[in-house]
Image (cartoon, helix red, strand yellow):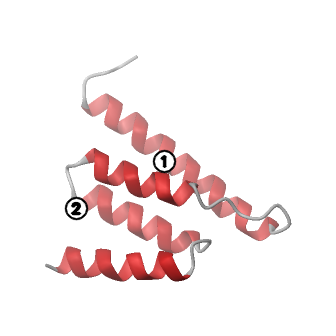
Amino acid sequence: MIITQKRNHLELQVAREPLNYDYWFDYCTLEEQSSSNDARSRAVYERAVANVPPASEKRFWKRYIYLWINYALFEENAADASGDSS
């Protein structure tokens, strides 16, 4: 129940401020820690990285790149957990 409330709160936050990558980090972390369903976590990461910052807004790019790095680490860990070591 608490997870659902947090998820709903974060859904509202990312809907209001899609370029606030701190909210996306929180949401991705919540999904990774609360669900054994990699597809659900992957879907949140996909939504997060789809919010590309405007080219002129350099202040957003560092956080956006870190989001991609976290996504890559998530995929690497998911591949290791599934036994795919290639």
Quarter-of-image position of residue 60: bottom right
- Position of 53 relative to 70 (above/below): below
How far across and down, in percent of the image, does residue 10 sit? 39, 77
Q: Residue at x 31, y 60 (%)?
A: 31
Q: Nearer the viewer, residue 1 or 54?
A: 54
Dot 2: what SS? helix
Check the image and report above or below for 84 versus 55.
Answer: above
Direction top: furthest residue: 86
Query: Compared to 51, does 20 lie above or below?
Result: below
**Residue 29 place in picture, x, y as percent:** 37, 62
State left or right for residue 6 relative to residue 54.
left
- Few, some or many residues within 10 Å of mark 1 (<14, 14–19, 20+): many
| Picture quadrant of residue 19 | bottom right
Local crowd at mark 2 within 10 Å, few (<14), some, or many (≥20)? few
Give the farthest residue toward the left: 1
Residue named by callout 1:
71
Q: Please give left or right for residue 42 compared with residue 18 in the image.
A: left
User: In the rendered image, which residue does mark 2 sit on?
Assistant: 34
Going by the numbered disc 2, the residue's amino acid type is Ser
| Residue 20 % position (x, y) | 59, 74
For label 1, the SS is: helix
Cα separation, mark 2 vs mark 1, equals: 16 Å
Left or right: 55 as drawn, with respect to 8? right
Numbered tag placed on residue 48 in the rendering: none
Q: Are marks 2 and 1 in contact (CB under 8 Å)?
A: no
Quadrant placement of the C terminus = top left
Viewer-proximal residue among 52 and 2: 52
Q: Amino acid at mark 1?
A: Tyr
